[in-house]
Amino acid sequence: MTESRPHGEVRQLRLVVETEDLDAAIAFYRDTLGLDEELRVESEGGAKVIVLDAGRATIEFVNPAQKRLIDGVEADGTPSPKYRVAFEVVDTAGLTEELVRAGATLIGPPTVTPWQSLNSRLEAPAGLQLTIFQELEPDDQPVEPEPDQPGEPTLTTERRGGR
């Protein structure tokens, strides 16, 4: 396909996020979320950049009606900002718990979506709103969690069907 693209194909999508507390952001995204550090550069005047590898990148464009639908499913209608970062993971519920313990604010707990993924919504360091999602297989069924304490539901789910 490079014949129709004289300058070649896009090789990487890089989301650049300015944050006042770089150390806290890196601790959250690298140490808790598990993104690998790919590059670190320090320059004069205290300038720093740290690039974390987030795996495969895509851009998801949605119209306003779809955005409202997603917000309704993931966050009980709480509107998301124009830009939201979504990470596909292996265990939405477990990672959501870790991210909350690391300082994220839970907006919407793990919820099975109409498109068969398990999604949670969080407000995270550096001012980013995150969706954590796990693609479900047809026989995956979340089990109602037992509360940690009366009136406080846990975020864990289990797989059924022998997996």
Image (spheres, grey):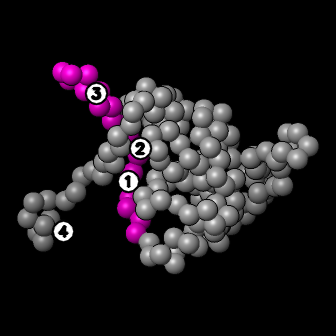
Helix, strand or loop at label 3? It is strand
Q: Farthest residue to the left: give it.
A: 6
Q: Is residue 35 magenta?
A: no
What's the mark number on residue 54?
2
Instruction: Give the mark nearest the N terminus, 3 or 1.
Output: 3
Q: Amino acid at mark 3?
A: Lys
Q: CA distance from mark 1 to mark 4?
A: 19 Å
Q: CA distance from mark 4 to mark 3?
A: 37 Å
Q: CA distance from mark 2 to mark 4?
A: 25 Å
Is residue 89 visible to us here?
no
Instruction: Give the mark nearest the N terminus, 4 or 3.
Output: 4
Q: Position of residue 61 (x, y in %)?
A: 40, 69
Q: Residue at x 48, y 36 (%)?
A: 29
Helix, strand or loop at label 1? It is loop
Q: Quadrant of residue 73?
A: bottom right
Report how many numbered discs are placed on residues in the image: 4
Q: Position of residue 117 (x, y in %)?
A: 62, 62
Q: Amino acid at mark 1?
A: Ala
Q: Residue at x 62, y 43 (%)?
A: 105
Helix, strand or loop at label 4? It is loop
Q: Amino acid at mark 2?
A: Ala
Q: Residue at x 30, y 52 (%)?
A: 13
Depth-wise, is mark 4 or mark 3 nearer the camera? 3
Report which residue position mark 1 lands on. 57
Report which residue position mark 3 lands on. 48
Residue interval drawn in magenta? 40-61
Q: Amino acid at mark 4?
A: Met
